Amino acid sequence: MSFSIAIDGPAGAGKGTIAKFVSEKFRLKHLDTGLLYREAARLVIQEGVDVLDVVRLEEIAHKVDTKCIIENNLRNEKIASIASQIAVVPSLRRVLTQKMRDFTNNIEPKYQGVVLDGRDVGTVILPQADVKLYITADEQVRALRRTKELEKSALQKILEDIRLRDERDQNRQEAPMQIAEETIILDTTFLSIDEACEKAAKIVTQGMPDIIVKTKIS
Ligand code: C5P
C-alpha cells in the first residue's frame, strides 16, 4: 500500500501550492481534486446544462476524464462559481469521488504514493490517508492573494493581446506600422504621462519654424 497525503482547506489558503511542493519533494503523484469539479463546470457551460438538473449533472460527472483536463482553461471565476454550485449535488460528488479514488489506485511505480488536495480529501476521498493537513488563513489575506493572482493572469492576457496586435500592425501588407525617416523617437517607458507630454511639446517647439510663436515649455 503506497503513501497517501490528504490536504484540505478553503480557497486561497495555499493548499494547491503546498500540495505541488510536497508532491515533488517526496515523489508523489498529485491530484488537485477541485479540477474535476471545475472540469464538470466547464462541461455544464458547454452543454448548457441547468445547475439544478441533478440527472444531467450526474451524466456530466461521468464525462469528466482525469487524463484530459486542461488546467489553464479552468482557472477563472465563472468556472469556480459554477463548480461550487454543482458541488452540492450528492450524485455528482459520488461519481467524481470514485474517479479520484481510481486515480489514486492507478499510479505509476515511479511514484511513492499520492497527494490529493481539495475540500473533502481527509474526510471522504481518502479517510485512511497517512498524513492529513488542513491549510487555512484569514479570509482577508486569502482574498488579497486571489486578487493578486487575478491581476497576474489579467496582466499576462493583456500582454499577449498587445503583442498580437503590434505584430499584426507591423506585418500587414498595406501601410504597416513603421518608423518613418527623420523621426524623433520618444520612449515613454520611464516617464509619467505629464513628463511625456512635456517632452513631446518640447520636440514640437524645436521643430517649429521661427515665424510661429513658440509657447514656452519649462
Ligand atoms: O479548489 P478549487 O477552487 O479548484 O475548487 C472549486 C470548487 O470545487 C470549490 O469551491 C468546491 O465547491 C468544489 N470542491 C469540492 N470538493 C473538493 C474540491 C473542490 O466540493 N474536494
Image (cartoon, rainbow, N blue to C red):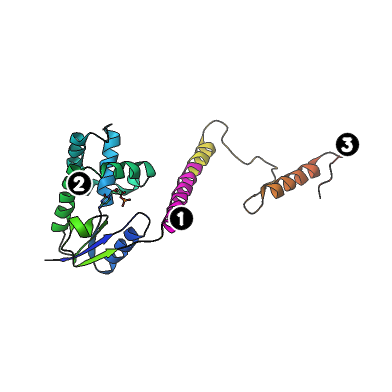
- The residue at 50%/37% (across/down) is 168
Nearer-N-terminus badge (1/3): 1
Nearer-N-terminus badge (1/2): 2
Residue range (magenta): 139-162
> Label 3, on which residue?
211
> Label 2, on which residue?
93
Q: Is residue 26 above or below residue 214?
A: below
To which quarter of the image does residue 89 belong? top left
Identity, as a three-letter code, of the amino acid under mark 3? Ile
Closer mark to the observer between disc 2 and disc 3: 2
Q: Main secondary structure of the magenta part?
A: helix
> Is residue 133 rendered to the left or right of residue 102?
right
> Is residue 138 rendered to the left or right of residue 51?
right
Real-space Cα separation, disc 2 to disc 3, in angstroms = 80 Å
State whether label 2 is within 8 Å of ligand 1.
Answer: yes
Q: Element at badge 2?
A: helix
Residue 186 is inside the magenta segment: no
Real-space Cα separation, disc 1 to disc 2, in angstroms = 30 Å
- The residue at 26%/46% (across/down) is 37
The circle on residue 144 is 1
